[in-house]
Amino acid sequence: MQKPNIISAVALVALFAQGCGDGIPREVNFTEHVAPIIYKNCTECHRPEGIGHFDIITYQDAKRYASGMAFAAKEGMMPPWPADPHYTSFVGERIMSKRDIQILEKWVKDGLKEGPQDKMPSLPDYKPNYLAGKPDVTIPVKPIFLEANGFDKFLIVKVPFELPQDTFASLVEFIPGKNNLVHHVNGDMVIYDDSRKENVFEGEYVTNMVHDSTIRMAFEKLGLPNDDGTYPALQKSVVNYLPGAYGQKYPQGLGGYRLPKKGAFLLNDLHYGFTSDEAVWDSSYINIYYSKEPPKRPVQEFQLGTLGVSPVEPDLIIQPNTVKKVYSKLKIPEDISIMTVNPHMHLLGKSFKAYALTPEGDTIRLVSIPKWDFHWQYFYTFKKMLKIPKGSTIVAEGVYDNTRKNLNNPFSPPRLIKDNDGSMRATDEMFQFIVTYVMYEQGDEDISLDVSNKD
Ligand code: HEC
């Protein structure tokens, strides 16, 4: 056996004196080491007003869920952030450091010590971080009844409005009623031409995505078409909500909307996570902030894949007991600056990746989701505007797992699953990649998109 030389022996001694290296204390306790980590990474959701279905605040809470917490952190399931931070990084990233994960694991291994009371940090001050001042108009979303059954619910909800006149808005934000139940919202705005729609309030307000098999059927039930049966214009992604990210706010000069006199917000995907033990009503609402000026650089959107501008190839038909890879490609005719990207698949999704190939053959990374998680479908916002040069091709690739190994497979034994004419049922599949952007202007690369909702 080789003797360790003096230098490494000294280094080893020094390491032991500190603990295990990497700043991990020799003995981990809750108040000094674990609570700060949980308060930084978890309590935003795991507190009474958060969306997690249990609290992790006190020593007793943490002790009770300790092994689940350590497991969820180690597996990268919690905090929920499916995008690979080594591929691209985004605003509001929820990533736990390796050191923090190790401390959590060590705490469990060392027997869940409590630590000195006087070292206990105080819970961050979670102010409601929406309200960008005082809204000019508040429009209630029709209250939604949630049974006490613990199942996720995916709804399409119409929120019609009639304003005194056509105007402009700088921001539209969704405020959840039951903060702990509304998981996310992706919503568009229907823009009516006043003369073609008499009553924007007719028709139903809520449909369940699992029951209405196609988008067209759902839209008809909601009374969205014009009086002559044609379809009104749709402005995409006007109201998106994620826990901690209310309206999408952009730096000065970017974004903003033309608001029609008659319109409706169309919450295409209002997802309620774990419902509570008791039946409750959720009364969410939408705030509008007017703007005196028309939007200078309105944010636009395109969508690859299912119902989008570029086809899914090969067709999204996934035979039982197979793993299938598909892609969709779109050539970009002008220089653009991307702000957000949103990958979308359903339960068979296994992984997702998107990038742009420039005419020079460079690759611009967009997003990679190594382990698809149906529950967490974010609009990922780049830290700075991302220029995609004219002539580039955006490529989105998705892998679907229709085997028994996929624990989210809705069928056992697996069945043939396909992209069913835009069906949104979770049991049918979709492959979409949504990109929001503006036309490129010199200097866009330096514009930070990290705008806190607090200012
Ligand atoms: C963005 C909100 C959010 C954050 C931040 C968050 N959680 Fe969660 N967590 C949830 C929700 C919601 C669930 C319920 C499962 C679901 O909907 O996917 C959950 C479930 C869990 C579960 C149960 C696992 C399961 O499969 O049901 C554990 C354990 C957990 N979280 C631990 C943590 C820990 C530890 C942290 C911090 C390191 C954390 N969570 C951060 C929202 C969050």
Image (cartoon, rainbow, N blue to C red):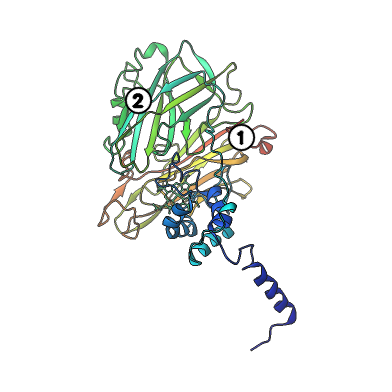
Dot 1: element: loop
Q: Which residue lies furthest to the bottom in this view?
A: 1
What amino acid is at disc 2? Lys
In the rendered structure, the answer to whether residue 365 lies left or right of residue 347 reads right
Q: Which residue lies furthest to the left in this view?
A: 413
Out of 195 and 140, give the one closest to the viewer: 140
What amino acid is at disc 1? Val
100 vs 13: above or below: above
Say which residue appears at 56% left-offset and 48% top-offset.
40
Measured from the top left, where is residue 114 in percent x and y? 51, 58
Which residue matches tag 2? 142
Which residue matches tag 1? 451
The circle on residue 278 is: none
The quarter holding residue 381 reads top right
Out of 312 and 178, give the one closest to the viewer: 178
Q: Label 1 crowding class (10 Å Cα cut-off): few <14, some 14-19, many 20+?
A: some
123 vs 138: above or below: below
Say which residue appears at 72% left-offset and 82% top-offset.
5
